[in-house]
Amino acid sequence: MSKVPESVRKELAALAAKPESDIDFSDLPATNARDWNGAVRAKFYRPIKQQLTVRIDADVVEWLKAQGTGYQTRLNEILRDAMLNTARHG
């Protein structure tokens, strides 16, 4: 995976900081809820994983493992859901 050049990083940061009111959407067609039926958010998003060591209560680990293979993935999904809910609701 290649690194993003500093010039591109600065341009992206400037665009992200731009208020939505300054963006010209006139060339985009209007959409409604029906247009988004079946849409999947972040389908191709693959976050970078970071390996670390954590201490989790044994009963919590057993509960995760009892649900079958993929307990680490489930743990990550639970944490991501908590993170997104906190971000949405402050």
Image (cartoon, rainbow, N blue to C red):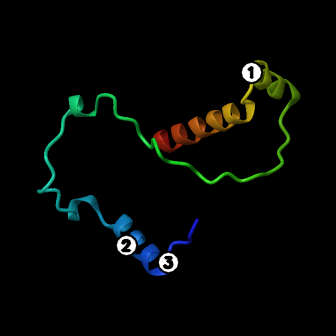
As helix, strand or loop, the secondary structure at mark 3 comes to: loop
| Amino acid at circle 1 | Gly
The tag earlier along the polypeptide, 2 or 1, is: 2
- Mark 1, residues whose alpha carbon is within 10 Å: few (<14), some, or many (≥20)? few
Query: Which numbered disc, 2 or 3, marks the residue that appears first in the sequence?
Result: 3
Of labels 2 and 1, the one closer to you:
1
Picture disc at residue 11 = none
| Residue that sits furthest to the right in the current view | 58
Q: Is residue 10 above or below residue 16?
A: below
Q: Amino acid at mark 2?
A: Ala
Location of mark 3 (residue): 5
- Taking the image as shown, residue 67 lies to the left or right of residue 26, namely right
Q: Position of residue 27 (x, y in %)?
A: 12, 56
Q: What's the residue at 76%, 52% (across, down)?
A: 51
Task: Name, please, the residue furthest toward the top.
Answer: 66
**3D distance between C-alphas at marks 3 and 1:** 42 Å
Disc 3 crowd rating (10 Å Cα; few below 14, some 14-19, many 20+) is: few
Q: Which residue is mark 1?
A: 68
